[in-house]
Amino acid sequence: MEGGNIFKQGDDVTFGFVTRDYKGSSVDLTNKQIEVAIFNGNIGVIYEGPASFVDGKILFTIKRVLSDGKFQLEFTVTDAADPKYRTKFPTEDYASELTIKLSADNLDYVGASITTVAQLRSEQEIKQQQFELAIVPQVDELKQRVENGIGAFTEDMEVLDARMDEVNLRTFNEKVTNQLDDIVTNVKKMGFIGDGVTDTTQALKNAISTVGKGDIYLPEGVYVLTDTIVIPQGVAISGQGAGRTIFEFPKGVSKAPFIARGITDKTFKGFTLREKDHNFTATAAGIYIEQSISLLFDDVYVEGFANAFQITRSSGSTSKNKDITLRKCRGTYSKGYGITSKYLDGLLLDDCVFEYNWLDGIKSEKSTINVIVRGGRSSHNGQSNILGTGGNGNGIDAYAGGESFIIDGLIAEYNQGAGVYVKTGPLNTADQTELTNVRNLEIRSPRCRGNTHSGLDINRVDGDTNQYPLVAQANVFGGIYEKNGANGIYVRERNVALHSPMCKENQEDGIKTSPTSYGFSVIAPTLIANGQKQAGVYNGISPHGKKNRIAMGIIDGGLDDYATVGDFIATVKHHYASIRVHGTTDDTIIRDVICRNNAHSHDVRIDGGVFCVVHHGRRDAGYATYGSEGSTVFYNGLTYTKVTPSSDVSPAGWELQNKKASVLADSTATDVAALRADFNSLLGKMRAVKLLS
């Protein structure tokens, strides 16, 4: 069987598979026992049965309807004559896939999704065409025969009924009608007019009251709403797709169009909610979610309003929302945030877009925990600053949220703030029963580019002058932090590790830590031509806090022409130093970093601090470190200690520790030789007086 063949369930088709080994040679399974299994990881095994081996192929026949989905095929082969023989096809190096799709011919497997409704209608149109082609000529003929008085009318009607049964039109239409009645409420029968003018608020409220529990489906159109729709437990709303089914609210909204309160296990899908002629004046959210569990918003666009999506809890309530998912959703042009969440355990933003909002794209605060942002974009936020009223807007602002944030593959560009901003502040001390620390953060491969502040900012409100807890335990893997208005990455934290970040052409430092940071490491960074604000002032890395570790990587203050073979001497050297260790540091170790094109004469500058060690490895003779008293440098296998203040930049300020050791060894050797000579002289004298034989 070739891949990509399509069969219809119920057609009683026999499947045949050729067996080959990893070299492509045929495998003979004659006289072997073969069992076939069809399964997947979610449902498990949906079919098991025997198969045969005929003419070099495994053959089996499925004679019943199976569940829809994507499944794996697996054949287990044994040999009655050889109990040890047991093999499987395909092997672990290969995989076979069987896709079973929903069909209107098997209504037992048609789910209540909008795709299925469209599928049913499409097949109904096909059947109607078949009817017209096969039956209408017969009807015309029948009418003619009746008019001419030829033949028995009853007999001809029986023939007509038989013909109609051949295409199953009556049965099919009856099944489709029943199925659609089960799936959706027919909004056209309840006063809905999607013309963009007629107010359909009361019609939608009536539909919710009528359906009780179920889904309300609205086809393509613009449905005007003027009052809040409270969606109760058991009800969900879906449309024909975002941009096709549109709910429109007047400009300057003061009440939320949709409130989902106390809802469990429902899906809202395929519609746009927009504020007409929005101009950042609304005071109510578009979709307001309270005390709900396991909600999915799929392909839902919200444009305008105070916040596009707002997840919180009612005043006086102590309940949290739990497990809210937005998939392929958008929140744009809101007066506040694209999405804001409080008191939430479990938020997944999957391939969502939040852009052109007045403040932040994504705002997560007040005990929001277990957040995953996977892919998507949060860009061009902070319109308040662009339009001249002040303020800023970050791609993500995770403020006093709580534990466990994962940000994976997000694009955060051109925001009027940071690309990703994680911080603590007064909210962390406002309610100690629910708000503690912000910790356990993992950021993977973001693109933070062109933001007015830093690309990634791990910080706390009011900087180093307060007692709010620091953000703690953060791992950053990769990512591009480019052309931001401050630093590529700024860290005021506790226990943060950066793995292979790329910071390029940022206005200030590539990476900078604050004096209150504690436990910071960066491994294999690529830091290129930062300090674009003023060449020769800013650095590749500027550590300030305690316990810093910097290892490997490339720090180049010049923009390479990408054509030079070998070393490249930049015309403009943007970095003052590749690494500048400031006086507030304590316990800093730098090892095996490639440093190039710095305005300062030394690649590593140590301005003070306690216990700073630099491992240069084997470098050119002119390579050196500018250091404060007490600093240690390992260079070409030798160890130097700075014995003069940092103002002394002469080589004489560095004392070679290896030399001390060699001098001590020489003096020790001399003393031992003298003792040996004295001892031999004493032995001679003793032998002379015959005290020794």
Image: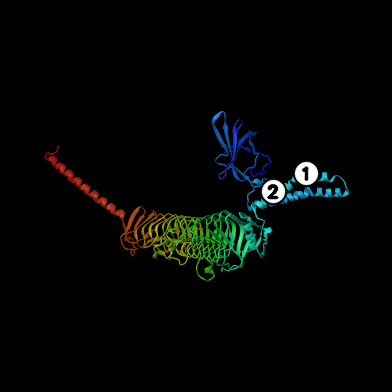
**Amino acid at dot 2:** Lys
Q: What percent of the width, then of the height, locates residue 304?
A: 58, 65
Between the residue at mark 1 and the residue at mark 2, the CA separation in whole angstroms equals: 19 Å
Q: Does residue 240 show up? A: no
The N terminus - image quarter:
top right
**Amino acid at dot 1:** Ala
Label 2: which residue? 175
Q: Residue at x 64, y 57 (%)?
A: 210
Judged left or right of residue 117, residue 482 is left
Residue 279 has which mark? none
Q: Quadrant of residue 237?
A: bottom right
Mark 2: give few (<14), some (14-19) or many (20+) Cα within 10 Å.
Answer: some
Q: What percent of the width, then of the height, locates residue 362?
A: 52, 61
In terms of sequence position, does the residue under pointer 1 or pointer 2 come before the other? 1
Mark 1: give few (<14), some (14-19) or many (20+) Cα within 10 Å.
Answer: few
Q: Residue furthest bottom?
A: 388
The C terminus - image quarter:
top left
Q: What percent of the width, then of the height, locates residue 563?
A: 51, 58
* Viewer-side residue, 164 vs 13: 164
Q: What percent of the width, then of the height, locates residue 271?
A: 62, 59
Judged left or right of residue 599, residue 91 is right
Q: Quadrant of residue 296?
A: bottom right
Judged left or right of residue 552, residue 411 is right
Residue 162 has which mark? 1
